[in-house]
Image (cartoon, coloured by chain):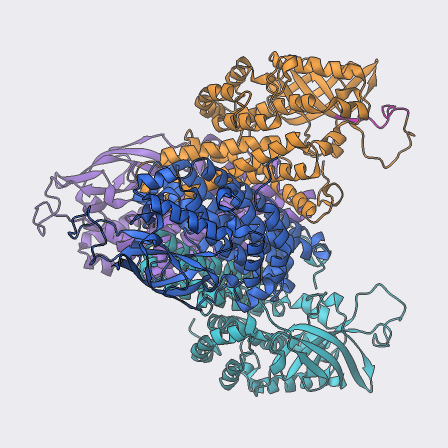
Chain colours: A cyan, B blue, C orange, D purple
Amino acid sequence: MMRSVPGLAEAQAVAPGLSERAAAHDREGRFPAADLEALREAGLLGLMVPERLGGLGASFADYAEVAMAIGAASGATALVFNMHASITGAMARTPDGLLKALGAPETALSRRDEALAAASKGSLYSVAMSERGSGARLSALSTTYWPENGGFRIRGTKSFVSGAAFADTFLVAARADSGSDARGPDESGTSSPLPPRVSYFLVPADKGCRVEQSWDSLGMRATGSDDVHIDASVDSGALLGGIEGLALPLAQLMPQWLVASYAAVYVGVAQAALDAAVAHCSGRLGALPAVRARIGRADAAVAAARLVVLEAARAVDAAPGAAATNRWVWRAKLVAGETAAEVASSLLEAAGSSAMRRGHPLERLYRDARCGSLQPATSDVCADWLGLAALGRDPALDAAEPRW
Amino acid sequence: MMRSVPGLAEAQAVAPGLSERAAAHDREGRFPAADLEALREAGLLGLMVPERLGGLGASFADYAEVAMAIGAASGATALVFNMHASITGAMARTPDGLLKALGAPETALSRRDEALAAASKGSLYSVAMSERGSGARLSALSTTYWPENGGFRIRGTKSFVSGAAFADTFLVAARADSGSDARGPDESGTSSPLPPRVSYFLVPADKGCRVEQSWDSLGMRATGSDDVHIDASVDSGALLGGIEGLALPLAQLMPQWLVASYAAVYVGVAQAALDAAVAHCSGRLGALPAVRARIGRADAAVAAARLVVLEAARAVDAAPGAAATNRWVWRAKLVAGETAAEVASSLLEAAGSSAMRRGHPLERLYRDARCGSLQPATSDVCADWLGLAALGRDPALDAAEPRW
Amino acid sequence: MMRSVPGLAEAQAVAPGLSERAAAHDREGRFPAADLEALREAGLLGLMVPERLGGLGASFADYAEVAMAIGAASGATALVFNMHASITGAMARTPDGLLKALGAPETALSRRDEALAAASKGSLYSVAMSERGSGARLSALSTTYWPENGGFRIRGTKSFVSGAAFADTFLVAARADSGSDARGPDESGTSSPLPPRVSYFLVPADKGCRVEQSWDSLGMRATGSDDVHIDASVDSGALLGGIEGLALPLAQLMPQWLVASYAAVYVGVAQAALDAAVAHCSGRLGALPAVRARIGRADAAVAAARLVVLEAARAVDAAPGAAATNRWVWRAKLVAGETAAEVASSLLEAAGSSAMRRGHPLERLYRDARCGSLQPATSDVCADWLGLAALGRDPALDAAEPRW
Amino acid sequence: MMRSVPGLAEAQAVAPGLSERAAAHDREGRFPAADLEALREAGLLGLMVPERLGGLGASFADYAEVAMAIGAASGATALVFNMHASITGAMARTPDGLLKALGAPETALSRRDEALAAASKGSLYSVAMSERGSGARLSALSTTYWPENGGFRIRGTKSFVSGAAFADTFLVAARADSGSDARGPDESGTSSPLPPRVSYFLVPADKGCRVEQSWDSLGMRATGSDDVHIDASVDSGALLGGIEGLALPLAQLMPQWLVASYAAVYVGVAQAALDAAVAHCSGRLGALPAVRARIGRADAAVAAARLVVLEAARAVDAAPGAAATNRWVWRAKLVAGETAAEVASSLLEAAGSSAMRRGHPLERLYRDARCGSLQPATSDVCADWLGLAALGRDPALDAAEPRW
């Protein structure tokens, strides 16, 4: 508790502005450009970047604290920030040794450092992974790539790309075109039953990426999670880690970046709902026992979810990718998503019909809060994985759904 | 089961059109004028009007069936219809004997018949009862009236007036101005601790009523439940029943018109959510056990809520105002409101993130469904009343909140 | 509503005695012999027997009303009665035409009439179907039979045989020994992948049946649902319907006798918990809002469950075995089982720690109520089937678990 | 995390024995004498005693860890241990300065040290506070005391005295007899509306205490929480702190000893239920998605409850009695109690009917787990207090029920 959390003071400083703008961003379904500018000026785009590269050098636990603070002010902004933090965090915190063991060349490491340094100077990253139809399952992607002119050509359409219109660079997941020689020399080329080789690329937004403004959703409306149509030629250095096929191993080894980082945002949203309900009910309503009971139970639930997210974050820092860590990651996603939805729904009921008017914080938070459980891995999927793990089975093999 | 339900075939005939327009009405928060026209042309504005006055002569149980069918097509339209049906139903089904016992003059009965006949010809009624601050509690109204020029002058502002901009006539609840002689000859005029005398008036919309387009809500967006500013002079025949102070006795005697009529609408909404989820999940998603379990549990919950609403409606027809009937009325409101909200939330989770896109039926139904528990009497209030009644206490005396 | 329900007055007359003895039967885990005697004297063992055979000629809906009344007095006694009523009801209400179409000889029908007449004279039937390991799945039975001396020899061990020590006759489900010629002339005898041929036998309790007093359970302790070791030789007339392989078709065609008949019992148990809580909380506790809310919500839930069970029962009478009927049957099982458990748990909490003392009705009802969801088909299985049916799939083919 | 938790290794060492005996103790409702002996031999009766007095010097957080470990092995034994630890912990950790500020003489401190030293030598303390009718509310006690022969005479009957028959010393709460001069020189003696003066005494079990074996409960059957009839003469040193009227201030200042210490026990019980369910479902059942989902959700819920209890314990150590600490204490009680009950119920359903047999761990744990929410302060009371605190009100003034 002694050590201060890197970025937390900065997050708390920008929070009031974010909070003030949240209603307007939600109403218009507008990407929170002003919020992004505030985060950039506060240096928070460098939150996960090592200090040697100009960043704040935050741990995953630090990130969770910062994300909760931002999420309590604006859930949508926190989700955009979360994508950026996940990319920079995964780059910063994947050990060099692991990358080398997977075959990463030295040049890939320096390219990565450049990418991180750019973030600390204010460059925004966004994740272009999901696709219509396949959802977030890496194994079912239809975006493909193949070698071309010493680099790669990537083609496909991504959806749910948060902050797409404002991103400087996309992290694009793509599948090696099976007709190409992309599989490299160690494979036979025969039609093997191997899983598809899925690679990550850092694609500059101005290189063959076209954003289609398609986002218009129930909640988290200001994330601008538009579709992105990609037909890009990139140099060989754009291949993340310099290794093809990195996506699935990273998903298995470090699910926190795909799963748990959302969780902190939704604890923030749940906290905001509690604060808004307390403000709304401070008068006559607060004297009603049924209202007090709803607020009291919400208070306990939010406090519990916060602890679970922080514990998961600590586990990620201490033993990233360990089986026990991954269980904490799934618990965090499950508990945060369900708590946010339940708390916001109950508190809206406590506040009564006047809180249903658009523009009332609880009206927006009720919609925002519902999104958490539905983001991958969904609550039902997390429950399945946790059950399998408790039973000593392997979620990677036995789950009701393909895992990634 | 043999006898056909009056109005049900008509409701089923207009339902597809309502359903088709629901998304647009929701998006624009626009009153469903085309829906109203369809209901009018189908003769459904006369649903509750006795056949001798040109109506369909529906019972409360008939109304519940019709309201479920309309609600499944468009919750907002069903709520507007519900207000009209509540006014015409209460007028049609309050026994002449009761009105006479309360002091109603003969002229009031013929005036009522005229009002009912107008409904069967397509005149729309709307309830102007709630006010900001007092909610739906009759005892806390600030709209007042006093005698003037042989009739009455009414002044105040109402909120949550569904369909305000399209209503031909408002049912206005107002409190006798304590400074006036409105209390009549049988009272002393001294500052007694008597409850306020609250009366109902039928006020033509074009006589001193100004609609302020203020409605902009989470769900049920197309009801156009705007504010209405009233400064109206009406003739003496506008006083409902010809009796001052009728509002509280009617609320006590026939709570169904204030409480239970909503319930059927929300069962319709829950059914629509189930149908939309089944359509959405008929492919790959339907093979997932967690999705099936959500749909299966929703199916059972909706079926149960439907039975409760129909049982309450039968009780209202058989013994309106009886203590046992009122318990069914509260049960119907509680069960329908909670079922709709829970079912829609769980089914949205089953359907996944693609169903969160605006325009997807589940996105709208999730917001619409949340409104039921919050409409008065709220779920928490119904639970309190049911608990008191089970314990042999009197909700009118012992409830945690003033009842009306 | 005019017509009186056969057996209901009799059930109400014996209920106070059952209720009075329930605590002692529970404490000692003793079969309720005195209750059985009371039911017998009241003629209720003939409830489902046609009037032409000396019985009361009750429909399934009548049975549901009677079972709720008995269940409210003593859940355990109602479960024993339920087994008897299921056997006699299934025999009485399986149409002769269906049996003949399945191949039943004329003698089987007269044998069935004798069996029914015996019930109306006070003979008790009990179901010997479940086995350890296979649960209630007919397809996994290990009890076998084979032809011997013109009749059949049956051997195996059954568990969960309610009222075993007091039954006059067991309905035994057994699988044709694959080594025998029991499959009859129309089959090849080669090891085909056909489902096992499972037949029902009426086996007199004193013919090779030994009861092992093994029942000692959390709740429903007085059912005496002991193990029965069977090594019996029966004449050919003991084969139910005179047809081998009848069990699976009957389970498919008339699931109500395996699934829904429990449901009414648990609505009775839930009602008893509500009544006990009201009695316990009539003083100081009833003034607490949290207590009232628990009682109010329980009241609504029990009322809803009762309606679902009665609707399912009416559907069974109107169209037994129809797909729509079976969905009502599963809804009834699901809703009744979950309602009983949730209501009893919440009401125990309302009543507080003094209600946890053994001998307090809520202490027993809390344990009894938990058993409903766990009896086959469990709540999770019913939810799966309902989800499949809603999605237009066939629970018999697509369910997560084998159905019977 | 480096520092080892005092007593945890000892608790883990005795746990298997406790676990093995739990079923028998439950069945016979017998106090776990062998467990007590094991705890005594392991030195755990001195857990909360300062090292200078021969104890292990555990903090509240240490206690929580130990109580979870014991609770996972045997809930009933953990509750008996909890009472002892609460008394010794409260004595050990109430600051001397606070006691002196409240008026404690020097002799009271040395007397307290003697009492603590006795615990570290194996003397067992038990709480004799609750009474029939008043529950755990100190303000409603009927046990009284008055000065006699230079000491005190205490008379009354206590209930829910865990481990009564094996306790060496009772902590007795008693109200000053209003007819006596017990109020001391600083009060007028006029019949003032002052709250009753409630004092604590350490009464040797062999001095005028008679245990009546009355305990026979749904769950936690082995605590032997019998009634104790007291008619005791004690010397003046038996008055805790040497100060009359200490009970209410201590309850306000250190609610953790009355409220939160239970919480850890119920997390242990919930963990035991999870472990038992995993063991039970490791075969065929674990392949069923519905079973896995129940186990997965239980896993997350138990993990969350554990974190809440540990956080509350840390807050108690860091700032005992602070408003923020007390909110953590109520959250811990609420979350642990509800989690245990819900988890055990859901897991029993996952395990199926074979787990309902008496002697199966889940059967016992289901009953044990239900007790947590009902122990004071109940879940509903905690929710009310938390709601009041969140709204900035004072639970001591505004709660729906008198607080102590």
Q: Measured along the vertical axis of the image, is residue B363 above or below residue A207?
A: above
Q: Is residue B29 left or right of residue D143?
A: right
Q: Residue at x 73, y 24 (%)?
A: C95
Q: Is residue D298 left or right of residue C90?
A: left
Q: Residue at x 72, y 59 (%)?
A: A402
Q: Is residue C221 left or right of residue D221?
A: right
Q: Is residue C30 shown in magenta?
A: no
Is residue D17 among what the camera can see?
Answer: no
On the image, the x and y values in percent for residue D322 come to 31, 62
On the image, the x and y values in percent for residue D370 come to 46, 42
Count of marks, rendered view: 0
Q: Measured along the vertical axis of the image, is residue B371 above or below residue D197?
A: below
On the image, the x and y values in percent for residue B281 come to 68, 55
Which range is magenta?
A: C174-185
Name the quarter where the C terminus of chain C is drawn.
top right
Q: Is residue D93 left or right of residue D21?
A: left
Q: Quadrant of residue B356?
A: bottom right
In front of the other: C244 or A237: C244
Q: Is residue C184 shown in magenta?
A: yes
On the image, the x and y values in percent for residue B395 come to 34, 43
Q: Main secondary structure of the magenta part?
A: loop
In front of the other: C371 or B233: B233
Is residue A258 among what the camera can see?
Answer: yes
Q: Measured along the vertical axis of the image, is residue C397 above or below residue C154?
A: below
